[in-house]
Amino acid sequence: MLPEDDDMGIESEDDEIAEEEIQTESGFGSVIVVDNLPCVSPEKYEKLLGVVTRLFSRVGTIREGGLWMPTDPETKDSLGFAFIEFLTPAEAHAAREQTNGYKLDKSHTFVVNMFDDFEKYLKVTDEYQPPAPKEYVPTDNLLEWMMDRRGRDQFVVRYGDETEVHWHDAARRQPEEVYKRTFWTESFVQWSPRGTYLATVHRQGVAVWGGPKFVRLMRFSHPGCVLIDFSPCEKYLISYSSQEPNNPREKASLTLNIFDIRNGKKLRNFTGGTEDFAVGAAAGPGGSLKWPVFKWAGGCDDKYFARLGKNAISVYETPDMGLLDKKSLKLDGVHDFAWSPAEPILCAYQTEQSGGNLPARISLVRMPDRQELRQKNLFSVSDVKMFWHPQGDYLAVRVERYTKTRKSTYSAFELFSLKERDIPMEILELPDKSEKIIDFQWEPRGNRFAILHGDGPRPTFSLYCMKDLKTTARGVQLIGTLPNKQANCMSWSPQGKFLILGGLKALNGQLEFFNADDFETLNAAEHFMCTDIDWDPTGRYVATSVTSIHQMENGYNIWLFNGELLYRTPKERFYQYLWRPRQPTLLTPEQERDILKNLKQRTKRFEEEDEALALESDAGLVAMRKKLMKDWEDWLESKREWIEQNEATRRAILGDRLQEGEFTVEQVEVEDKLGTTEELIAA
Amino acid sequence: MRPYLLKGHERPLTQLKFNREGDLLFSCAKDPHPTLWYSSDGQRVGTYIGHNGAVPSCDVSLDSSRLLTASQDSSAKLWDVETGECLHTFKFQAPCRAVAFSLGEQHAAISTDAFMAQPSLIHIVKLAEDPADQESEPEISFTCPKGRISRVAFTDGNTTLLAVSEDGYVRRYDVETGKMLQEEHIHEGYIQDMQMSTDGTHFVTASLDKTAKLVDAQTLEVLKTYVTERNANSAALSPIFDHVLIGGGQEASQVTTTSSRAGRFEARFFHKIYEEEFASCRGHFGPINATAFHPDGRSFVTGGEDGYVRLHHFDNDYFSARFF
C-alpha cells in the first residue's frame, strides 16, 4: 500500500478518474433519473409512487427517503420524472441497465439515466475541437535486455515493500541490480510471456513497464483489478475483477477487460455473473472461478482465445474480439479444454451424457475450420486431465476411470502424437494402475515425459519416451524407474535433458538434480523449506525460493543446472521470484546445429571471459573490504577527540579508583624453528 | 576447547555479565536466583536469594563489590557481591526490567514496564555511600513512550542515559531533567539487547527484526547491520578484535513446529566492519538469549532459553587465524 500523501513519484491520471467515482459514492453516484413517467394528478400521486417504488426495489435497495417525484408547484400534478437513490452506485448502475426501456404501459416507456451523466454530458461543448496531435516520442528499445553482451538473464524479486530487477551474474556469483522501486505494485508483478513487459497491478488497474530504465509504457484502467493474463505473443492483456454480492439476493459478478497492450485501447469488456463463467473445470470450490478464464491458442500471433461455456466452447477472434463465425463451438457436456501451445488446435473433454448412454469424449478440434482431427470415446470416466507438450508435439490425457464396483478409480494415459500422420494414439498404463499420480511433466524440446506416482510418502519416479531416438521405432517405452523418491513435484529444464525432483513444503525442500539422458542423479541438495523452483529460460540455472507463506528462511538460492549452489540471498517477507522470459530465438535450426557442433571452440572465449570476471570480482571484493576498513578507521579517528573528553570525565569521576590500562592487546610474533640442516658450500 | 556447561538455572537465561577484571560471571534468568560463577572454570560461587520473580537484568559495580538486579516482582535489589546479602530493596509499582550503574556508582537507573494504568518509567536512584542510609525513593522518575525498555546505559559522563525499547527506538534522556534529547528508530522489532563498546563510541543492538546493528553512541546513527535471518536476542562486541558475537534463533514457541536444524541456535560471529558471518558455534538446543565477551577477549559465554550457560574459551587458532 502506498503511504498517505505520497505517490512515490508515480503520478497517475487514473487517480482523478478513480477519485471522481469514489467521491460520487457519497454524492450522486447512486442516483438515477427516471423519465417518461406518467404525469398524474395529486389523487393518483400516491398510487404511482407505489408502483415506481415496487418496480425499483426489485433491482436494489432504495435509500430511506431516496425517491423523489417532483410536482408542479401550481397544479400539484407530477412532472413525469423521478429521482431514485440507491444504496450503492453498483445498484444504481444495475437499475439503469435493467429498467431502461421498461414499458409501464403503451405510452410510457421509461428512460433511465445516471444523475451524474447529465452533468457530464452538459459539460461537453457543442463545437467539435480536434484533439491536438501528440508529438512523437521515440520509445526505448524494449528488447534491450536481450542484447546483454554476456547473455545474462534478468529476474524480478518482490520482498517487503520493494520490487527489484536484477541481472543474474553467474560468473561473479551475485545478482547485479538493474532497477528497484519501493511500492511499485499493490499486489504482484508479472512478466509478459516473452519478457518485453513487466506488469504491475494497482487498485486503479494495470500498468506495464519496460525498456532499459523500466519506464511506464502503458496504463490500463480497471478499478479493482485482481488478476491479469497476457496473450502468448504479448499483443493483448486480459484483466479481471470480481464483485462480491452486497446482499444474499444478488449473485457475484465479474468484469473482464481485454486491452491492446501497445495502444492501450480497451477492445472488449465481458461482464456477467460469476456462475455463468464458472462452469465445468473452470469452476473452483464454492462457485469460484479458476484463472485464466480465457485461454489463448498457441502459435498463431494471438489469433484466437476461448472460454468454457455451458455445453459449448466460445472461441473469439482477434483483433475484433468477436465470436469466431458468430457462433460457439457446440459440445454437449463439455467439461474442460486446452489449447495446443503450438497451433490453434484445442482438445476438449465432454463428460458422459444422458445417464451414461453417451460415452465421455476427448476430441481434438482445429480452428478456425472446426474440423475434428481426432476423437476418442471413453467409458466410466471419473476425471480427465490434459497435458500438452510445451512445443505441441504430443498430448497426454490422464483418464481416471471407475473400477467395476465404482468405488475406487484407476488411472491411465492416452498419448496422442500430433506431429505424425492421422495423430496416432497410444495407451499407457502404469504397472500398478491404482497408484496415485502425483505429477506428470513433458520434457520441453524433447519426447520424454516423467511421472511421479505412488501412494506412500516416498513415491516412485518413472521416465518414458515416446520414440526411440536410435531406432526411431515409435511407441511409448519405459526408460527407467526409481522407487523411494523424496519428492512431490518435478521441474524440467526448459531445454530438456535435466530435471529436478523437488520435495517442497512438507518435505523440507529436498532437491534432486537428475540427468535424463544418462538416467542418473547428478546431485542431491536441500534448500530448507523451499516453496518454488524456477528454471531460467536458458536452462542453465535454477532458482529455488522460500516465499512468505513460510515464516522462516525467506529468500532465494541460485543453483547451476547440476546442483552446484552459486549464491544465496536471504530476504525477509519474500513474495515473488520470476525469471524474465526470453524472446524466441532468431537462429535458424541449421545455425543452432552448427553451434552445437563447434561448441568447444565457441565456449573457449566465454570461459576465458568468465575467469577474468571472477578474478576481477575477487579483486573487487578485496578493494571493497579495504575501503570499508578505511571508512571505519576514519570514523574512529573522527571520534578520537570525543574519546579523550570521555576519558577525562571518566578520570574525574572515578579518580584514584581508575587504574591505567585495564587490558592491552599485544601482537606477539612466534617463530617456530622447524629444523636445521648444515650444508657445506663448495668454496 | 570444549565449553564448560554451567547448569544452575532452571529457566531461560536473560543476561550474562562479567565483572571488570573478568574473573567473575553473573548470570540472571527467568528464575528468581541470579547466580555468580568463576569465569575461569565455571564453578558456581553462589546465588543471590531474595527475589520473587524473573530477573531480566543485572549490573555489577566497577570494584565488583555491589550487584544490582531488576526483577519482575516489582523490585530492584542491591546486593553485596561477596556475602550475597541483600543491602537494599527498591520497591516499585510495576515489574522492573533494566538496570545500570552510573560511572562511579553514584546513581543507578532502573526501568519499569507499563503496568495497569502506569506507563513505562525510568527511575534514577541515588546510591548512598553506606547502604544503611540508602533512600528508597528515586531521585527522579520519567515517563517513556509505550513499550518495554530492555536495556539502559549511562553515557557522556553520566549526564545522559541511553535506553532501547520494545518499539525499536533508541532514546537518549537527560539524567537531570528526564527530558528526551534524541530518539532514533533503528529497528523494526523489539530491541532485546544493547552492549557498549569498550571505548564507548559505539554500541551493538540485537532485535527481533532479525538484525543486529552497530550504532554510533554519539549521533545514534546506524553504522553497520548484521542480518541473522533469525531473531537476534543478544549481541556482544569483542574487546580485542573487530568481531561481533550474535546469539538468537527461532522463537522458542515455534521450535517444535519445524525441524531442529531450522532453529539456528548457534552463537554466530560476524566481522564488525565487513558485516559478514565467518564462524558459528553450536551447542544450545534453544535460542540463545544472552551473550557476553570476557573483558580480555579470550573467552565468551552464551546463555540459552534451555537454561544452560556455555562458557567457551577460544583456542589459540582464534588469535592467530586470519579470517579475512
Image (spheres, coloured by chain):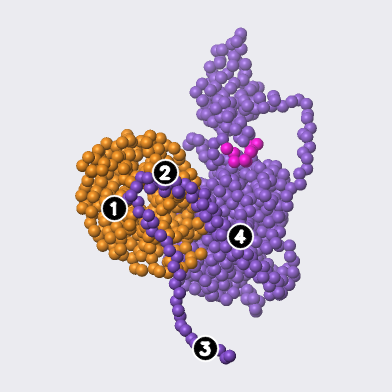
Tell which subunit mark 3 falls on: A
Determine the secondary structure under disc 1.
loop
Looking at the rendered structure, the kind of residue marked 3 is Glu
Q: Residue at x 38, y 63 (%)?
A: B298
Task: Residue at 78% x, 40% y: name it.
Answer: A135
Which residue bears the numbered disc 1? B64
Label 4 – label 3 distance at C-alpha = 58 Å
* Circle 3 residue: A679
Separation (CA) of disc 3 from disc 2: 66 Å
Check chain identity for marks 2 and 1: say if they share one: yes
Do the residues bearing badges 2 and 4 touch, measured as CB atoms within 8 Å?
A: no
Q: Which residues are magenta?
A: A6-14
* Chain ID of residue with mark 1: B
Distance CA(mark 2)–CA(mark 1)? 22 Å
Q: Position of residue A240 (x, y in %)?
A: 59, 44
Q: Is residue A4 magenta?
A: no
Evaluate if marks 3 and 1 touch, with contact meaning CB atoms under 8 Å apart: no
As helix, strand or loop, the secondary structure at mark 2 comes to loop
Are the two marked residues, 2 and 1, in contact with CB atoms closer than 8 angstroms?
no
Q: Nearer the viewer, mark 4 or mark 1?
A: 1
Task: Quickly name the residue at label 4.
Answer: A168
Q: Earlier in the sequence, mark 4 or mark 3?
A: 4
Residue under label 2, please give it.
Answer: B156
Query: Can residue A671 be seen in this snapshot?
Result: yes
Do marks 2 and 4 both belong to one polypeptide chain? no
